[in-house]
Image (spheres, helix red, strand yellow):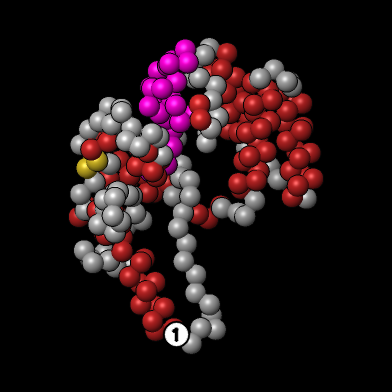
Amino acid sequence: MNIDAKREKFFDYSKQLKDNKYHNDTQDWTEDWYADMSDAGKDAGKQPVLGFFGPAWLINYVIGTHPDPNPTKGDWAITTSTEPFFWGGTWILANKDTTKKDVIAAIIEWITLDTSETGLQYLWASGAYNTSGTKDTVASEVVMDKADGTVEFLGGQNMFDYFKPANAAADPSKLTQYDETINGIWRDAVRQYTGGEAKKDEAIATFKTNVKEQLDIAE
């Protein structure tokens, strides 16, 4: 395991953000984090939030539904992030021993390669595939060129204008089965440092120890 220098800078940025009160010191997937999405956090004396860093699904499935409907609907917009990234992915697998190879091949092609208006990606992007009409970013730029990506929650902005070029950052070549666990351990170490519970070198040492113990991965 090697720790990229950018990862260590993340410690410093996080400390700067907290020390200068540039964020409300909330943690994702908590009620306080959700409250910031609808300005409800200010009722508890917290600052109104300028924005969030997140993947495409954060818009319609998280911010837009906390609460549902979110009273800040129409006040939001998206822009290009300072660093490209992606979070998540949808996968489809077929058993090599299946006796229905032709049928399964047709299904996989419909999901992954069909860019027509009856293909899954177009139906998914345009919101026609679900009863709520929720639109979503898809893998195909061809589809996003054809589909209507305007979202009322974003004040009528076409989110595909930003997510089409952002697709280039979705490089799965460096993904591993350990990423979520390692990222969780890393963020815990960062919170220890920014919260004053440990010095930077101590927090990094704890991170290495926890990765070794949980995943048997060492330097």
Q: Is residue 78 visible?
A: no
In the rendered view of the protein, which quadrant contains the C terminus? top right
Of 155 and 35, which appears nearest the observer? Answer: 35
Residue 27 position in % (x across, y down): 55, 29
Of 32 and 118, which appears nearest the observer? Answer: 32
SS assignment at label 1 = loop
Q: Is residue 176 magenta?
A: no
Residue shown at 46% from the left, 54% from the top: 89
Of 99 and 142, which appears nearest the observer? Answer: 99
Of 194 and 145, which appears nearest the observer? Answer: 194
Residue 178 position in % (x across, y down): 65, 51
Q: Is residue 93 above or below residue 84?
A: below
Instruction: Give the class, few, some or many, for how many residues have Cα within 10 Å of label 1's Cα (few <14, many ≥20).
Output: few
Q: Is residue 55 magenta?
A: yes
Residue 127 position in % (x across, y down): 27, 53
Residue shown at 65% from the left, 43% from the top: 182
Q: Is residue 39 above or below residue 163?
A: above
Residue shown at 76% from the left, 33% from the top: 206
In the rendered view of the protein, which quadrant contains the N terminus? top right
194 to the left or right of 89:
right
Give amino acid for label 1: Lys
Q: Is residue 34 visible?
A: yes
Q: In the current view of this chain or complex, which residue is farthest to the bottom?
A: 99
75 to the left or right of 170:
left
Residue 5 position in % (x across, y down): 62, 33
* Range shown magenta: 33-56
Q: Is residue 201 above or below residue 91?
A: above
Residue shown at 65% from the left, 36% from the top: 186
What residue is disc 1 on? 100
207 to the left or right of 158:
right
In which quarter of the view is residue 106 placed? Answer: bottom left
